Amino acid sequence: AISPDVGPELARHKGLTGLMRLLDALDMDAAEELLLNAVSALTNLSYYPSESSVIWARRSELVGALGSMLFAENQEAVLEAARAFGNLSRDPAVREEMHQTRVDEALVLLLDASDREVLTAAAGVVVNLAADPHCAPGMVESDVMVLLADAL
């Protein structure tokens, strides 16, 4: 999926809607490996922004499902969700949805994560959010920039 030739082709496949539904339908305790593989695949395929991509066409729907994964006990799930938000947060509509559903706040909390990969992924998303004129004012008013500087 990371191939620039193959990834966009796979991202257009209609079967990805089923993969997206798994995030809401399954419980991490009952189907951990399946969920980790699903979110990993979606993360890789979300790298290719295109309206012909099933993931990008339904990107706002992913915010809630991925947002809940940020609170999982499994650090691999947290990391993959944060990486997916790194890709998806390049889009202004997704950044707004993240702000409206307070996913941005969850990612700020991850700036204090002990896992270096989680911290790095969260920092990338926070940078994307801070660069958005609609999201930045709230971040400037809080300690986000101090946390980000400490994290980096």
Image (cartoon, grey):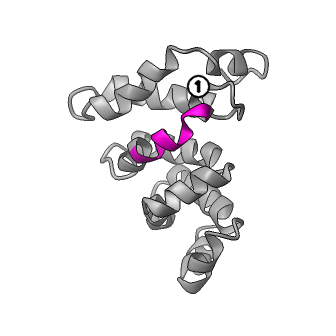
Question: Is residue 107 at all visible to an observer of this figure?
Answer: no
Q: Main secondary structure of the magenta part?
A: helix
Instruction: Please state the horizontal and vertical placement of residue 74, each as a whole percent of the image.
Output: 34, 43
The image quadrant where one finds the C terminus is bottom right
The image quadrant where one finds the N terminus is top right
- Tell me the residue at 52%/43% (across/down): 60
Measured along the vertical axis of the image, is residue 34 above or below residue 99?
above
Closer to us: 123 or 130: 130
Closer to us: 99 or 115: 99
Closer to us: 145 or 114: 145
Measured along the vertical axis of the image, is residue 25 above or below residue 64?
above
- Tell me the residue at 51%/20% (across/down): 16
Residue where numbered disc 1 is placed:
54
The disc labelled 1 sits on which kind of residue?
Val
The magenta segment: 57-64
In the rendered structure, the answer to whether residue 60 lies left or right of residue 23 reads: right
Please check the rendered image and state whether residue 151 is part of the magenta-colored stretch, yes or no: no
Q: Quadrant of residue 45?
A: top right
Instruction: Please state the horizontal and vertical placement of residue 41, each as a whole percent of the image.
Output: 53, 25
Could you say whether the residue bearing mark 1 is in a helix, strand or loop? Answer: helix
- Tell me the residue at 61%/52% (across/down): 93
